[in-house]
Image: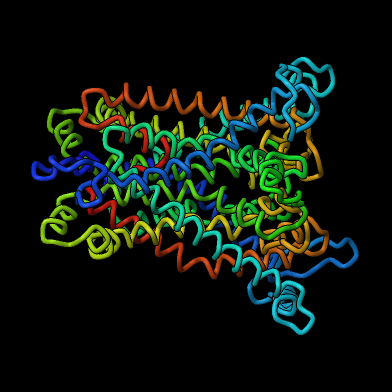
Amino acid sequence: MRNKNGFYAALAVPGVLWLLLLFIVPFYAVLAIAMGKLDRLFEVPVAVWNPFEWSSSNVINVWRDLFGSTSFAGPILLRTILYVAIAALLCLVIGYPAAYFVARFSGRRKGLFLILLIAPFWISYMMRMLAWVDLLQTGGYANKALSWFGISAVNWLGGKSVTVILGLVYGYIPYLILVLFAGLDRIDPALIEAGRDLGLGRVRTFVRITLPMSRQPIATGLLITVLPMLGDYYTNQLMSGAASTSMIGNLIQGQLGTPGLEGQGAVLSLLLLLVLLIPMIYYVVTTNRSSQVAS
Amino acid sequence: MTAPTSAGPRPAARRMSRWNPRNPWRHPWFLEAFTWLYLVWSLVPIGIAVLFSFNKGRSQATYQGLTWHWYFGDKTNSVLHNPQLHAAVIQTVRLSVLTTVIAVPLGVAFALGINRWRGYPASTFNFMMILSFVIPELIFGVAMFLLFTVLFTFVHLGTIAEVLALVTWNMSWPAIIVQARLVTLGPQYEEAAADLGASRFQTMRRVMIPLLAPAIFASAILVFSGVIDDFVLVDLLSSNAGNTPMSVIIYSTQHGGNGGPALNALGTIMLVMSFLIAIIGFGGYRFLTRGERGSRLEALTTIAGSEG
């Protein structure tokens, strides 16, 4: 048995080494820089590898930025939470009916619908954002359509929250829909028919049977959209570019590119990781369990 | 996936029309209309953006007639003649090929090893791999950026740093998909091969690899298209025009102002590349799983990265 295990361990070793060197070590490096010092002369971060010599100056600075009396990062944090919450909710409200229809009622046309639902996966995120930038320009088709109704041109790309949220919804909704579809498609139609046969109406069947059974896909789907949204710094840059719509991702990315502030960027990204660790582990555990059930 | 999902008309309901509101099994027209509306909203903007890549004028907002100008006609601003755009296409292909070639064998070997290796370290490493799958890309990108600028400074920002990061980020596709396939296969094929006297290497080569071929192929497709689409890692790790792929060029040119239809042409090239990969992926997956009970729909969702 020992020998057999050795063979399989040897197969896994290259991947394990790769992960250790390029996944675990990097995060220790981030920690060492977050807890490190700053070379004031050259404005470069100095990593401190020994935990006993860690300094908390970066953490204190970030804390002051976030929650202090003159905090500039506090509003950004709030805005991020607000944007992501609204966008995720809209994704769900738009995505659920579409996924529900394709999973339950599309019949023989399911293949066609599925292709159309999956198509955005194969179109680059930047191309999809570019498409909206084209439409929303001052002389673009969105304003032309509005002018038919007598509404004067709107400067959509001039720092509007609505535009940023539209970009987020448009960008991430395909992921949610596919997860929802996979979950809803797995519900045994016999259960729904049983509900209907026993006298429940359409709405009550949905509320009593379909909705409870889609709780898990909804949770996973929301997670799969919220996690990348929180690290997004490009959607709002393309859709507005104004400081009034910047999110936590812009803060981290900006600090990374500013000499002397890399340490604070490291602290921020670790804080974000810490907050997201619990939902991430939840995701890993639930997907593991469902794949074991499926087999 | 195999269960029929459309309820179908009951014998008792057949007498009532599909439109009759009292028919309990009537077709949900409202839902269907909503779904079509969503699809139009989701796909028509892309079509318009593709159309603008053929626009005669410099505008990305007003249609002025068709031309190949922005692909190769223009001597300075077309994708073919602008050195930056030209280099971006090549860099995207280079990154996709290199990453796929490195990440897929690593991930497949990892999956084979971890799945059959019983013990505490195996589950820990597997957990690590899945964590690398769900971690937000920006956080991972920050770690990679600091790794290459502070610790491993001998790896300069550029193609090598990009490939190292992309391989780490994408290795989880083969690792997860192949493991899922291994779980469904069970240990009996390997045991049968061993009973018949095959050595461990023969079992791998003659039994396991052929059985895993669809999963390996699907993950290669996902890695390749994932790298085409990748933005955050390459944005943080590219250093000059020679190692900047298409997604980053579109982003950095457009957010400074009007990028012109050449950017739409670049986006359209990305789109065509991805669709070609998708078609190859779908056809190849169907070919490799021929004779199995899987449906066309299953092949579709697998190639999109949702094997459930």
B215 vs A151, nearest the viewer: A151
Which quadrant is the N terminus of chain B positioned in?
A: top left
- Whole-percent x and y of residue A275? 54, 70
- Whole-percent x and y of residue A291? 28, 51
Q: Quadrant of residue A130?
A: top right
Q: Is residue B231 above or below residue B22?
A: above
Q: Is residue A222 above or below residue A145?
A: below
Q: Outermost residue, right direction?
A: A41
A68 vs A7, nearest the viewer: A68
A78 vs B224, nearest the viewer: A78
On the question of residue B308 being in view, the answer is no
Image point 70% across, 65% down: which residue? A33
Q: Quadrant of residue A199?
A: bottom left
Q: How many marks?
A: 0
Q: Is residue A281 left or right of residue B182?
A: right
Image point 55% across, 69% down: which residue? A274
Q: Is residue B225 left or right of residue A290?
A: right
Q: Is residue B13 left or right of residue A132?
A: left
- Whole-percent x and y of residue A197? 11, 56
Q: Quadrant of residue A159?
A: bottom right
Judging from the image, the colouring scheme is rainbow
Q: Outermost residue, left direction?
A: B11
Image point 52% across, 56% down: which residue? B135
- Whole-percent x and y of residue A244? 76, 64
On the question of residue A129 being in view, the answer is yes
B43 vs B289, nearest the viewer: B43
